[in-house]
Image (cartoon, rainbow, N blue to C red):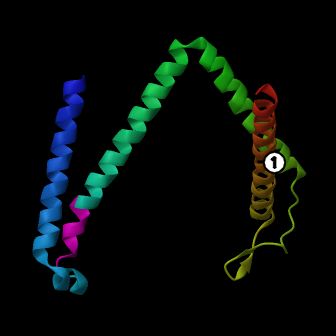
Amino acid sequence: MHKIFKIIAAVLSLFGIISLVRIIAAGDEAMETGEKAGLFEPMAWTAYIILGLVVLFVLVFVLQNLFTNTASLKSTLIGVGAFAAVLIIAYVVSGGDTMAYKNGDEMATTSESHLVGAGLIAFYVLLAIAAITMIFSGAKKVINK
């Protein structure tokens, strides 16, 4: 499996290097005028493929670790549930004031305003929780020394 990943990485690296050499060989003037604009597309697709593979591998290995280690699964589900609870409470508490938010030149709809307000409230709540956790953690370390 490790050998397959090395081969895939080598092929994608080679493809990226070839694309980069083609872009450099075309020159700056050709890129600015747009006559060689098609050279950027292979490099972009290489980046998209690499990003997709990285996200896929991270998800697979994280899920594999969660299901093989039940203790971490339990703590992860508790964390996800707490985060979902904060989001739900923030949505319920937030108002739908359409006068407070503009979407370009138009006023935001009630649902857009509601979501923006919920996002702000959730951010403030999570920020407060993080700050309180850091303060208590620091105080605990000072007390234990």
Main SS, magenta region, reads helix
Q: Which residues are magenta?
A: 35-42
Identify the residue at image location x=73%, y=37%.
Answer: 83
Residue 44 falls in image quadrant: bottom left
Residue 30 lies in the magenta-colored region: no
Residue pointed to by mark 1? 128
Q: Relative to 125, is 43 on the left or the right?
A: left
Q: Relative to 63, is 90 on the left or the right?
A: right
Residue 104 falls in image quadrant: bottom right
Residue 54 falls in image quadrant: top left
Identify the residue at image location x=16%, y=83%.
Answer: 30
Q: Amino acid at mark 1?
A: Ala
Residue 40 lies in the magenta-colored region: yes
Identify the residue at image location x=76%, y=34%.
Answer: 137
At which x and y percent is residue 95?
88, 59
At which x and y percent is residue 144?
78, 26
At which x and y percent is residue 65?
49, 20
Q: Relative to 28, is 127 on the left or the right?
A: right
Q: Relative to 22, is 114 on the left or the right?
A: right
